[in-house]
Image (cartoon, rainbow, N blue to C red):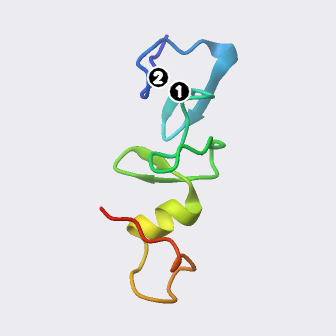
């Protein structure tokens, strides 16, 4: 039985969400920046960590500059 990459506890078949090649608990699969609960296959990944597509991934790792990527109002300090 695999362990969840977030909490390191066993993930049972009935509760697993498979994403990024790993099995997660449904409540553990959250954006690393804003903690929004994510749906497998509908989020972005950076260095093995999940992020919501917009605004977090766009603002953190997308193209910089005003008016690019549609995330100009979200500016995070790295």
* Position above or below: 37 against 73: above
The percent position of residue 68, horizontal first and vertical second, equals: 50, 85
- Quadrant containing the C terminus in the rendered view: bottom left
- Residue 33 circle label: none
* Position above or below: 17 against 10: below
Kind of element beneath mark 1? strand
CB-based contact (under 8 Å), mark 1 and mark 2:
yes
- Distance, label 1 to label 2, CA atoms, is 6 Å
Kind of element beneath mark 2? loop
Residue at horizontal 63%, vertical 42%?
40
Q: Viewer-proximal residue, 75 or 53?
A: 75
Check disc 2: other Cα within 10 Å, few if <14, some if 14-19, many if 20+: many
Q: Viewer-proximal residue, 53 or 34?
A: 34
Residue with the mark numbered 2: 4
Count how many numbered circles sit on residues in the image: 2
The percent position of residue 42, horizontal first and vertical second, equals: 64, 52
Left or right of 60, for residue 14: right
Residue at horizontal 53%, vertical 43%?
35
Q: Residue furthest toward the right? A: 14
Q: Viewer-proximal residue, 77 or 38?
A: 77
Q: Earlier in the sequence, mark 1 or mark 2?
A: 2
The percent position of residue 31, horizontal first and vertical second, equals: 52, 46
Residue at horizontal 55%, vertical 35%?
29
Q: Residue furthest toward the left? A: 78
Residue with the mark numbered 1: 23
The percent position of residue 47, horizontal first and vertical second, equals: 34, 49
In front: label 1 or label 2: 2
Check disc 1: other Cα within 10 Å, few if <14, some if 14-19, many if 20+: many
């Amino acid at each position: 039985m695999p362990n969840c990459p977030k909490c390191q506890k066993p993930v049972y078949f009935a509760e697993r969400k498979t994403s990024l090649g790993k099995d997660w608990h449904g409540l553990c699969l959250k954006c690393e920046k804003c903690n929004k609960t994510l749906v497998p296959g509908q989020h972005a990944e950076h260095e093995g960590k999940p992020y919501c597509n917009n605004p977090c991934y766009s603002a953190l790792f997308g193209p910089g500059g005003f008016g690019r990527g549609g995330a100009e109002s979200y500016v995070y300090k790295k």
